[in-house]
Amino acid sequence: MALIVQKYGGTSVGTPERIKNVAQRVAKFKMLGHQVVVVVSAMSGETNRLVALAKEVQPNPDLREMDVLLSTGEQVTIALLSMALMELGLKARSYTGAQVKIVTDSAFSKARILDIEERNMRADLDAGHVVVVAGFQGVDEKGNITTLGRGGSDTTGVALAAALKADECQIYTDVDGVYTTDPRVVPEARRLKTVTFEEMLEMASLGSKVLQIRSVEFAGKYKVKLRVLSSFDDEGEGTLITFEEEDRMEQAIISGIAFNRDEAKITVLGVPDRPGIAYQILGPVGDANIDVDMIIQNVGADGTTDFTFTVHRNEYKKALEVLKGVQAHIGAREITGDDRIAKVSVVGVGMRSHAGIASTMFRTLAEEGINIQMISTSEIKISVVINEKYMELAVRVLHKAFGLEEA
Amino acid sequence: MALIVQKYGGTSVGTPERIKNVAQRVAKFKMLGHQVVVVVSAMSGETNRLVALAKEVQPNPDLREMDVLLSTGEQVTIALLSMALMELGLKARSYTGAQVKIVTDSAFSKARILDIEERNMRADLDAGHVVVVAGFQGVDEKGNITTLGRGGSDTTGVALAAALKADECQIYTDVDGVYTTDPRVVPEARRLKTVTFEEMLEMASLGSKVLQIRSVEFAGKYKVKLRVLSSFDDEGEGTLITFEEEDRMEQAIISGIAFNRDEAKITVLGVPDRPGIAYQILGPVGDANIDVDMIIQNVGADGTTDFTFTVHRNEYKKALEVLKGVQAHIGAREITGDDRIAKVSVVGVGMRSHAGIASTMFRTLAEEGINIQMISTSEIKISVVINEKYMELAVRVLHKAFGLEEA
């Protein structure tokens, strides 16, 4: 008998019919003698419906109230799934985040989990119940409803698996595993049987949106065995995310090509090249709660330097405004930007021990006439920023160049 | 400065536009220096949508999970209204029933309020916030979400007013007050400036469904000043429900004509006229959880008696079956019934001190050739049961006979 946490996303619970299918799948695991905790998202479309309602009332909605509003989405699903499980003759009980309780900090719309009370869930599991938990939500220490941000249901699933020391956390989604890249861009993309935690992190952060990045970090931290599976395919074994390189079955150098067009770049031109200038530029950006991804600084010729970084595209305008506000103070000549960029990365733990990955990547892009605007590297990935119109082309040629279509 | 609790029903908050209108109205009271607590229902249509979803999944939905599901309706509204209030520059904070907390028993779908914590709301009010509370819902002592049953938002409003010792509880609805009768039946029906609590109880229980009866009882118990107003009319002063006859401004003898076609009558003919026979007849009916309204017993000539009572029309068939099952045991000659009846009542605290009300009523009906099938009286009302086809006619002629169209 194992304890399994299963997480189903919005598409998997998008209609009453699909909710009944999820109940069938849960029942199958229950019949095998496992204890099952199910974490669910809002029914697909529901979150967007609620956001639209909010914007009609308050164009820039208050974050606390937004969390109160959005958390109803998952609450609807837990009730419906519990009903569907009972209809199959199982015992089931729903829990909101507050009822669990999943204690978070008070950062509305992007709260972090601080603690999970497992006592009530454990008692229900021991009494034979399927425990159905609302993903994406928690409660702060004052009793305010919080949400973990979009995609936070994955985090809930992993956090519950960690708290309950579950044997496996299964993330059901509309894809049947982690692919070498997005099959919509490269039809030859191939499902990976395993992927290391670090590769997965890079793939997730770079836009291969199978799992939310925080959930993968969480899984790594607490050594939760994480499996990505399709909720529409009863046979597939999905992709197992491993935390040790030795667990890795396939010894490919490169695991996949990730991409992301959610970013924008901002360049601060002609700032004095003196100590502390990076902080003077990024300090105000950080104070405005804007996350920065890639950062590049080039030394110029005349004692000044150019400084480029990327932010989420939604925060592009805000970041530009913040910097224009401090332009005089930091002594910048000009502040420019571009929100029509894309980031493309090759990812693989294998590249640690293999030279030549970077040159293969750059040559491949050059042969297609794709100009590289920024480069950033880590132990297991190489990322480039290019004009977004070349993104699909870049992904396709790189996928082929690294032989990823071969099993 | 007064503390006002305002309750808005589903129609009043049915669209983002209407929610903004409610915010405008709340702002007006806030600008006058009042402290305001707002209780809201689910947006109109939302509860039905959720019920339909549940029934698709579980035809006979689990009551605990149904409450988890339905409580999301009001949670959506509190978030949206709080946003609308902030958009007007007011400080506002939403509370679910659990957040308040409104402690109830664990009777899912029809819970009763046991206790209300007023501390957090009070602190918010003192800090200048509008407090926005989800109606209809609470939380039991184990943390389960409960609902008070349909229409329970009125009860929430009154209970909060009682807990906070509010100066007035304003119930906004789609009518602008309590009328002498239903204006759809009698166009000359007139809004009452005041109505006593007892009259209101009779009006409500007899089908003038302006307020949910439990909320009126609650208001009476805790002496909450209750006012019914229209949320679509900025000028009207609604109807004030008073608890002392002396509060009454208008000294009319009769306040209104109530009516109800939700009942059916059952007659048990020819039972032995002996002690205990009423219990033998009504005991099995009560055991079947069927509420009985009017009861009449006539002595016959031959040592037998006829016994007539009314039940809700929905329970007519069930009540007939129950009685046919015990017919032999109680020795009844025949059991008959009629579900095409209506009850029409004249209501008014003034009738206590005025003779002739009954005779005016009976004469008025006789002049129209309307046969009276049953009569029942209390201190402040006289009710008759008639053939339902005469109901509107009876209401119109009685309204005129008692001069109710005159201010």
Image: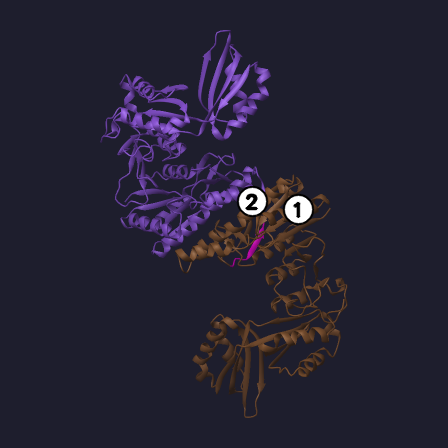
Chain colours: A purple, B brown
Query: Could you tell me which quadrant the N terminus of chain A lies in?
Result: top left
Q: Which of B84 and B283 is in front in this view?
A: B84
Tell which subunit mark 1 falls on.
B
Relative image position of residue A58 (x, y in whole percent)? 58, 40
Q: Using residue B199 as the reference point, say whether residue B263 is left or right of it.
A: left
Which type of secondary structure does the marked residue at label 1 adopt?
Answer: helix
Q: Residue at x 34, y 46 (%)?
A: A36
What is the chain letter for disc 2?
Answer: B
Looking at the picture, does residue B368 appear above or below residue B73?
Answer: below
Q: Is residue A289 visible?
A: no
Residue segment shown in magenta: B110-116
On the image, numbered disc 2 is attached to which residue? B79
Please check the rendered image and state whether residue B35 is part of the magenta-colored stretch, yes or no. Answer: no
**Residue labelled with disc 1:** B24
Q: Earlier in the sequence, mark 2 or mark 1?
A: 1
Most extreme residue toward the bottom is B302
Tell me residue A397's x, y (percent).
30, 26
> Which residue type carries mark 2?
Ala
- Front disc: 2 or 1: 1
Q: Is residue B114 magenta?
A: yes
Which element carries disc 2, helix, strand or loop?
A: helix
* Amino acid at pointer 1: Gln
